[in-house]
Amino acid sequence: MIDLDGWSPEQVGLYEALGTVGNGYVATRGAAPETTADGVHYPGTYFAGVFNRLTTEVEGHRVENESIVNAPNWLALTFRADGGAWFGDEGTSVLEHHLAFDLRRCLLTRRARLRDPEGHVVRLVQRRFVSMRDRHLAGLQTTIVAENWSGRLEVRSALDGTVRNTGVARYRDLDDLHLSHVEAGAHDDEVVYLTVETNQSHIRIAEAARTRLFRDDEQVVAPGEVVTADRYVAQQFRIDVVSGDEVVVEKIVALFTSRDEGISEPGLEARDWAANFGESFDTLFVRHAIEWHHLWNRMQIEIGTDGDVASLVHLLELHVLQTVSDNSVGSDVGVPARGLHGEAYRGHVFWDEVFVFPFLSLRFPQLTRALLLYRYRRLDQARRNAAEAGYAGAMFPWQSASNGRDETQTLHLNPKSGRWLADASHLQRHVNAAVSLNIWQYFQASADLEFLRDFGAEMILEIARFWASIATYNHGLDRYEINGVMGPDEYHEGYPDRDEPGLDNNAYTNIMAVWCLCRAFDVLEVLPPVSAQELKELLGITEAELDHWNDISHKMRVCFHDGVISQFEGFEHLEELDWEHYRQVYGDIHRLDRILEGEGDTTNRYKLSKQPDVMMLFYLLSAEELTDVLVRLGYRYDGGLIGRSVEYYAPRTAHGSTLSRVVQAWILARQDRGQSWKIFLDALHSDMDDVQGGTTAEGIHLGAMGGVIDLLQRCYSGIETREDVLRINPVIPPELGRLAFDIRYRGHLVMLDLTPELARVRVDLDEGAPISVQYRRLVHEVQPGGTLEIPLV
């Protein structure tokens, strides 16, 4: 249980995001049902994969943005006493307010006392859920008690499609009206319906609500007056109450879109479900709770530390599964970086999935498989992206939405200066490496050869082809180079003395490009010979092309300075930043890019990073894998390289991204376990404490949440799935004490129980083949039904 106590305007947006309830198909923010978007509250409902494009004139430029759509607010419900003001309108006040999130059952409960301008006080208990079992259903149950008055209670239950996309302040100068009216009305005495359509993508969204009133557990027959307007429908009920009476309002809502499979028409389906699903709120909730019970059985992590840490870990797991779940399978959706919890990043899919997939691949491999197909379905568009930029193969975009076109903004607003600035973020070509890594890691964990043969291999090969085409040969150095890109850092868009954006020989990009080329060769080895040959013929891959890939994989340039890997060529020539000065002047310096631009300066001039760049290599690749790449390239590798590089870059990192702490905690796990645990706790609390000062209200940071879970699942447990072996090498912080959880590895249920002294690995009894488990240099074969115990001290 997570408690969100108190009420203040500064807390509301944060609590709404953290109180989001969803099921991977649709999610609704934890806004009070009687509120509308008023600068404090922000009701928001988002369907996975529902996007719409709008164009706005900005300083003489036509700027087109594709955004996740704020769908009609199905929660909308308010009430009033004796014809007074509607609760939620101006003049009503909050006397008490408390939110409790039951994580086990994914139920948000609100307890409040409200007062209207005439002094009528009501006590309120509201429970809501979006069903994990019945993905098209959601429920709101409201208990209203007239505390200091008797008379007529009026209740208004609505479906409000007059909403706009106004949840992010810096987007508010841009067009935000995405919905057009289709139809609204009453289906019968209990059900009203609303259908709208996005005005560019022409996706229909339909909702139908069944509202019932109860007193003393008996349904009150109170036919409602139906009010319709443009993008709006409501029922208004009247019931006489005596002070102390409890009136229960039960609202069950069916939600559909025209993207759904197996339907006739969304409006028809919504009305049919709302009218014919006769079960009560409690009955539907039990079905939902059972589904969550099964999910928790599969994703439970037992830790040997205090309950606050465990509760927050469970909150993060919950929000990941509310964004992507089995309800996402078949829906053609990716992993939105800010969940389905708000409108930041416009709901786009970035590389953040690289932080989420490892958790899913070892718990819900079928879900990772489905989400990877989002990329495969956009492979042809990735090929067009590459061709338009002058490259071969496939170039997946930095920001993806509906069809895989690059949706990365070309202008962005600096709220500190009020200036619109050119944005070169699209040059982050390293998203291609993330796609290859995700595919390969999924295959290593699942041994899903069918997926690799039918989908994954084609993507990996086309990405390899892209890296070969973007690399240019430097005859003087006998090295290949990749120029004009951005690394994960994002604070460096170019060189201070160049007009054109882009950096040369970003180490992360170049090394991961070589890693991708090596995986392309692995894929051709793993596939059955006939399949490999057919794929090469299909893609027109010749032996000469493979020889070229091989040459690049041995001659890619990586720059070094002062005994460390250079973030990019010329990094060592930049100026040092006076960090202490900026901390004293500004306090919070997470967004140094905005601070410096506001001063007329630029981050391009300084040795700093928004988030780990070189250090990302140590996060994604084991020391052994990184060594293999550098040795393959002919560079001398010594055991101190990683430590020196971390020592150099860590104090020059602003942690302007919530992902940054995840990476740093991971890297330090084997160098400074105590510091790693401290940073883990910082990362764990990042959304709950809103460390970036208001960004969580715009949507949770899904990559950071997935990354924190993965710190427990793979980092502190020392799990690697590589070369057909399950490797374990625990580094459990003393504060953690114990880790116990189940994973799915190559079709087996594998139970791990780890302490600083002992690792116990048990393979569930089934008909599968034995698995190989490696600790340090010793490989053990564990049969189904067998247990392996490894002393760690």
Image (tube, rainbow, N blue to C red):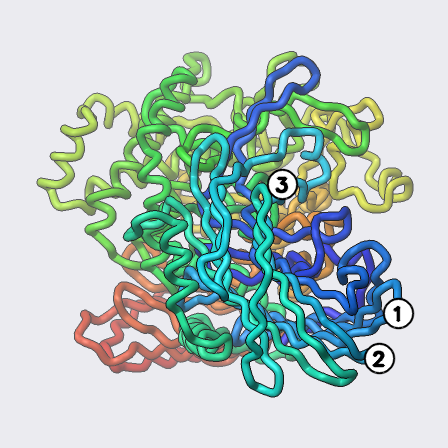
Distance in Å between CA atoms under marks 3 and 2:
37 Å
- Comparing labels 1 and 3, the label whose residue is closer to the camera: 1
Which residue is denoted by mark 1 in the rendering? 119
Q: Which mark is residue 706?
A: none
Residue 293: tell me if it is visible.
no
Vertical placement of 690 versus 336: above or below? Answer: below
Q: Amino acid at mark 3?
A: Arg
Q: Amino acid at mark 1?
A: Gly
Quadrant for the N terminus in the image = bottom right
Which residue is denoted by mark 3 in the rendering? 164
- Residue at point 57% right, 86% down? 217
* Image coordinates for residue 666, horizontal then vertical, percent: 57, 57
Could you classify mark 2 by the number of other residues whose Cα lies within 10 Å: few (under 14), some (14-19), or many (20 or more)? few
Q: Amino acid at mark 2?
A: Asn
Tell me the SS state at disc 1. loop
Which residue is denoted by mark 2 in the rendering? 148
Q: Is residue 249 left or right of residue 472?
A: right
- Residue at point 56% right, 62% down? 21
* Image coordinates for residue 243, horizontal then vertical, percent: 78, 83
* Image coordinates for residue 543, horizontal then vertical, percent: 18, 25
Distance in Å between CA atoms under marks 1 and 3:
32 Å
Q: Is residue 791 left or right of residue 645?
A: left
Q: Nearer the viewer, residue 490 or 109?
A: 109
Tell me the SS state at disc 3. loop
- Residue at point 48% right, 44% down? 183
Distance in Å between CA atoms under marks 1 and 2:
9 Å
Q: Nearer the viewer, residue 468 or 748?
A: 748
Q: Nearer the viewer, residue 776 or 343?
A: 343
Tell me the SS state at disc 2. loop
Proximity of marks 1 and 2: CB atoms separated by less than 8 Å: yes
Q: Is residue 308 left or right of residue 244?
A: left
